[in-house]
Image: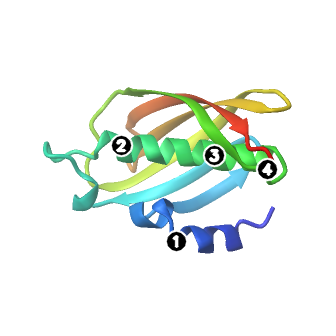
């Protein structure tokens, strides 16, 4: 699947608003990055949980599409555990498959900073959209 055109269109969506960048894609792992800046922080000066959740959700959505031959889906369940506060700087969200059926896919994801510190983990289930 060619992600170049898809990523160009995403610059005008929430993806672009947050500043996400595609790092790598295959059916066993997806990585996306974000340079966390002041606009991504909450009132305590750490990266907002919504930003971290969005990174993981997006990585898992890309993984679904890659694993399902370009099909798209929607998140039906997202469970997030925040483990360590994340500060401004480079963040990487990685997504991995857990279980797959014809119409759904369950995945796990994590966000780490440039030093490899684990900030949060998530599991999700996506349902394929009807064409």
Asked whether, in this view, residue 101 is left or right of residue 89, the answer is right
Dot 4: element: loop
Q: Earlier in the sequence, mark 3 or mark 1?
A: 1
Q: Which residue is mark 3?
A: 61
Q: Earlier in the sequence, mark 2 or mark 3?
A: 2
Asked whether, in this view, residue 121 is left or right of residue 88, the answer is right
* Residue lying at 67% horizontally and 68% vertically, measured from the top left: 6
Alpha carbon separation for disc pair 4 and 3: 10 Å
Number of numbered discs:
4
Q: Which residue is mark 1?
A: 11
Asked whether, in this view, residue 46 is left or right of residue 83, the answer is left
The label on residue 71 is 4
Whether pointer 4 and pointer 3 mark residues with C-beta atoms closer than 8 Å, the reply is: no
* Image location of residue 129, percent across then percent down: 74, 44
Q: Is residue 106 above or below residue 72?
A: above
Alpha carbon separation for disc pair 4 and 2: 25 Å
Alpha carbon separation for disc pair 1 and 4: 20 Å
Res 80 → quadrant: top left
């Amino acid at each position: 699947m060619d992600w170049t055109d898809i990523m160009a269109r995403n610059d005008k969506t929430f993806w672009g608003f947050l500043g996400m960048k595609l790092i790598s894609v295959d059916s066993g792992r997806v990585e996306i990055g974000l340079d966390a800046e002041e606009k991504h922080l909450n009132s305590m000066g750490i990266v907002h949980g919504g930003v971290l959740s969005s990174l993981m959700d997006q990585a898992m959505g890309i993984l679904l599409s890659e694993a399902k031959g370009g099909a798209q889906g929607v998140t039906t369940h997202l469970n997030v555990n925040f483990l360590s506060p994340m500060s401004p700087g480079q963040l990487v969200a990685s997504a991995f498959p857990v279980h797959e059926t014809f119409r759904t896919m369950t995945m796990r994801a994590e966000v780490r900073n440039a030093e490899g510190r684990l900030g949060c983990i998530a599991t999700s289930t996506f349902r394929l959209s009807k064409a």
